[in-house]
Image (cartoon, helix red, strand yellow):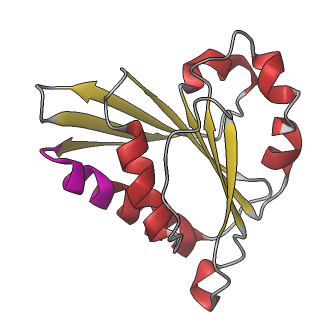
Amino acid sequence: MVKFFLSKSPAETKKIGRDLAKKIEKDGPLKKARLLALEGDLGGGKTTFLQGFAKGLGIEEKILSPTFVIIKRFKIPCLPARRGFRNFYHLDCYRLKSAKEVLDLGFSEILFCPENVVAVEWSEKIKKILPEKAIGLEFKFIDDKKRKITISHG
């Protein structure tokens, strides 16, 4: 299934992220981690989307792109509505030269755990190691304020 959204502002982009987080929470965990694979140009709205997504998971910490640390882990507050999710991992593959670099950081183990929700910015850099069941998100510039966000469920 593919859905298209037109965002006219960062606030709208965050709301689309919050709404997706609520849907994932409602559906609950799978056999492995829930994976979001984000692609798009620099400044396209990926991190802004994930700020809203994290809020939707109940995370109050500030979400910044982990470009220099590659991966950050956030605890998801334990509430009955969370349906078993405990950790949100945010990866930024912008600086990676190969998929092996992210595997060396324990990426396979993170994906194996159904209590994890994982978001990968610049996922095209590690596409060959991503599971087919990832939720794909593509961010395209319409103009300097508007973005087209395409969400596809693998």
On the question of residue 121 being in view, the answer is yes
40 magenta-colored: no
Q: Quadrant of the C terminus?
A: top right
Residue 14 in the figure: left or right of residue 67 = left
Q: Can you say whether 25 is above or below 99 in the image?
A: below
Residue 154 in view = no
Q: Position of residue 58 (x, y in %)?
A: 51, 75
Point out the stretch of residues depicted in magenta.
7-15
Is 32 situated above or below 104?
A: below
Residue furthest to the front: 68
Residue at x-position 61% and y-position 40%? 134
Q: In the image, is 125 to the left or to the right of 147?
A: right
Decide if residue 15 is on the left or right side of residue 154: left
Quarter placement of the N terminus: top left
Residue at 49 percent of width and 53 percent of height: 63
Dominant secondary structure of the residues highlighted in magenta in the image: helix
Residue 117 picture location, percent across and down:
65, 56
Give the image quarter of residue 37: top right
Count of marks placed on residues: 0
Q: Residue at x 67, y 33 (%)?
A: 70
Q: Nearer the viewer, residue 63 or 58?
A: 63
4 or 19, which lies in front? 19
Residue reaching furthest to the bottom = 80
Q: Residue at x 40, y 38 (%)?
A: 46
| Residue 138: % across, % down | 38, 31
